[in-house]
Image: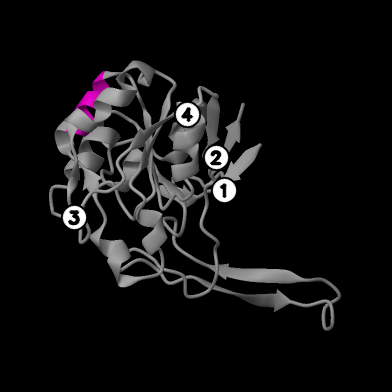
Amino acid sequence: MIVDLSVPVVSGMPVYPGDPEVEIAPALTVAVEGVNVLGLHLGSQSGTHVDAPFHIDDTLPTLDDLPLERFLGPAAVLDARGLPPRSPVSPSMLEPVAALLRPGTVLLVATGWDEHWGTPEYLAHPYLDAEAARLIVAAGVRTVGVDALSVDPTPAPADLLAHRVLCGAHAVIAENLRNLGPLLEVQAAGRPIEASLLPLRLHAADGSPVRAVARIG
């Protein structure tokens, strides 16, 4: 079974404050030109997307500098649901999945905040505590995804602590995921989960929209 972890890409969809708005409209049509072709205007961080380390530092790797192994692998799902708005995912919350955190693991942080997608409350999401990010990196994990707008608070603080810890370790960050809650039930049943977050092959990019999916074993 495959679970779609992506939000739909449509005109006027939510974007991070200040990012390019998404506009999708027919550029060619069968009626006029004989084929249907869409014109796309969107930012590299639109919708469900991955951040390359270059996103926050010009000296860090761009999207095409990273090995493809960063974008898929066995997943561990962290249950961070029920947190109040704008509260941290703390180091102690990692304990239930600590045994699963190792090199090659894709850590998916389920806050449940995807239920607020398209509403003002979506900006008040929980975020990853910097010390928790350090523990994740220390365990060898180099791919972290979250069902929220960012791994840091929104609006973004100047220090972007979680981004800097993860990107400083050349990790990939996936944001605006959805449907992570059902994966917790799968994990609790002992079934394996493989996540895929493969981006577009954009040259020297800071990130890319992705069609994120999870395959249930």
Compute the Cα span from label 1 to label 2. 7 Å
Q: Earlier in the sequence, mark 2 or mark 3?
A: 3
Q: Position of residue 207 (x, y in %)?
A: 42, 48
Q: Earlier in the sequence, mark 1 or mark 2?
A: 2
Label 3 Cα neighbours within 10 Å, binned few <14 / some 14-19 / many ≥20: some
Q: Which residue is depicted at the point 56% across and 44% down?
A: 201
For the residue marked with disc 3, what is the amino acid? Arg
Residue hosting label 2: 198
Does the CB distance between marks 1 and 2 fall below 8 Å? yes
Q: Which residues are magenta?
A: 132-138
Residue 154, image x and y in percent? 22, 59
Q: Nearer the viewer, residue 174 or 24?
A: 174
The C terminus lies in which quarter of the figure?
Answer: top right
Left or right: 30 with respect to 128?
right
Which of the marked residues, 3 or 4, is nearer the chain's N terminus? 3
Q: Which mark is drawn over residue 187?
A: 4
Q: Secondary structure at mark 3?
A: loop
Disc marking residue 86: 3
Task: Name the mark on residue 131.
Answer: none
Q: Amino acid at mark 1?
A: Arg
Disc nearer the start of the sequence (3/1) = 3
